[in-house]
Amino acid sequence: MRETRRQAIDEVELMMANARLRDELEPYRDESIESSVNRMSLQAENEYLASMLAWERAPALPISDWFSPPLQLLPPDALGDAQLSHRLKKTIQRLHSKNILLRCTDHLSDRELYTIIYRDILPCCEKKVDVPGKAIEWMCVEDTDTWLKYYATPVERRRHQEEYHVDLPPAENPRFKRQLPGT
């Protein structure tokens, strides 16, 4: 009897939280909310709605400004190789601390990856959303051929070839194996 009563109270609390989340999301509402939540449990729906609300309310800031003080790097050409490699490792750890994960980096030298972080990632404005288990994944591949050459699985390569009727670059192992946080 007690278990059934507790379940009923939990269900009522979930429904009240759901109503509150829907009210708070009303100014941002579109058809994507309804089509997404119809297949979820009430608990999963509330988590989804809470993450949407966090997204809508989050400020869009340059990634460098997510840090206190802001993360500023020296220009790549101002650093020697050893100094750059050391700073790259520390920067990757700091990015990971803010749930920014780097993907597809093994084809890049340390200097090339540092340059991408300096030139592309840190100045990029993104929504800073603190939702557990959510991360920004930054794909460090600038073109399809590089992805096909180093990262695509045989199945992905075959699908790409069938879909686009193109010759594929030969598959190769990337030159710079890295063990990055979050991989």
Image (cartoon, rainbow, N blue to C red):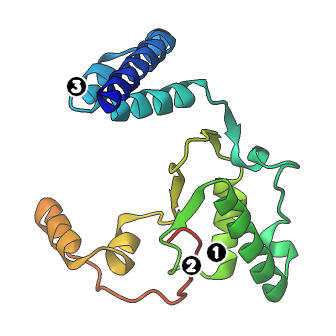
Kindly identify which residue carries mark 1: 112
Q: Pointers 2 and 1 in contact (CB under 8 A)?
A: yes
Q: Pointers 1 and 3 in contact (CB under 8 A)?
A: no
Q: In this view, does 142 lie to the left or right of 67?
A: left
Residue at figure coordinates x 39%, y 26% from the top left: 10
Report helix, strand or loop for mark 1: helix
Q: Residue 56 carries which label?
A: none
What kind of residue is marked 2?
A: Leu
Residue 44: % across, % down: 35, 35
Kindly identify which residue carries mark 3: 38
Report helix, strand or loop for mark 2: loop
Outermost residue toward the front in this view? 1
Gap between marks 2 and 1 measured at Cα? 6 Å
What kind of residue is marked 3?
A: Asn
Residue 131: % across, % down: 56, 41
Is 167 situated above or below 30?
below
Kindly identify which residue carries mark 2: 108
Q: Is residue 40 left or right of residue 104?
A: left
What kind of residue is marked 1?
A: Glu
